[in-house]
Image: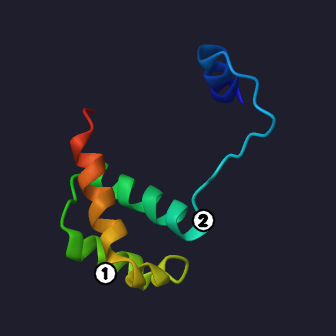
Amino acid sequence: MDDVANIIKVTKMTPKKIMIYTANALKSKAYHFILEKVMAGQTNMGAIMKELIANPETANIKKNPDFVQRTIKDILSEPV
């Protein structure tokens, strides 16, 4: 909530309503798995995708391979 307070302070606005959006459980679990793999040096999208599909908690990510590819790219673009 500190982030929200800082945004309100910087923008000098008094919002009537604040909406916070979060990723669904599948994307959150997939993101953390991908982050772990990339930090360990594994960046092969096919290999990561196979592991995600093999896990029952993240198997439905097969419907959204673009998410996996974008996530790998985004993680790699950030300085460590």
Indicate left or right for 70 with 2 as reference: left
- Say which residue appears at 71% left-offset and 46% top-offset: 19
Q: Position of residue 30 (x, y in %)?
A: 46, 66
Residue 72's disc is none
Residue 76 vertical position relative to residue 72 in the rendered view, above or below: above
Between discs 1 and 2, the one toward the N terminus = 2
Furthest toward the left, the residue is 44
Q: Amino acid at mark 2?
A: Asn
- Say which residue appears at 28% left-offset and 57% top-offset: 72
Indicate left or right for 33 with 26 as reference: left
Local packing at callout 1 (Cα closer than 10 Å; few below 14, some 14-19, many 20+) is: few
Q: Nearer the viewer, residue 10 or 65?
A: 10
According to the picture, the residue beneath numbered tag 2 turns out to be: 24
User: Tag 1's secondary structure?
Assistant: helix
Q: How many marks?
A: 2
Distance, label 1 to label 2, CA atoms, is: 21 Å
Q: Nearer the viewer, residue 51 or 79?
A: 79
Q: Position of residue 60 (x, y in %)?
A: 48, 83
Indicate left or right for 28 with 46 as reference: right
According to the picture, the residue beneath numbered tag 1 turns out to be: 50
Local packing at callout 2 (Cα closer than 10 Å; few below 14, some 14-19, many 20+) is: few
Q: From this viewpoint, is residue 70 visible?
A: yes
- Screen quadrant of the N terminus: top right
Q: Position of residue 41 (x, y in %)?
A: 21, 52
- Say which residue appears at 76% left-offset and 24% top-offset: 14
Q: Amino acid at mark 1?
A: Lys
- Screen quadrant of the C terminus: top left
Q: From this viewpoint, is residue 40 visible?
A: no
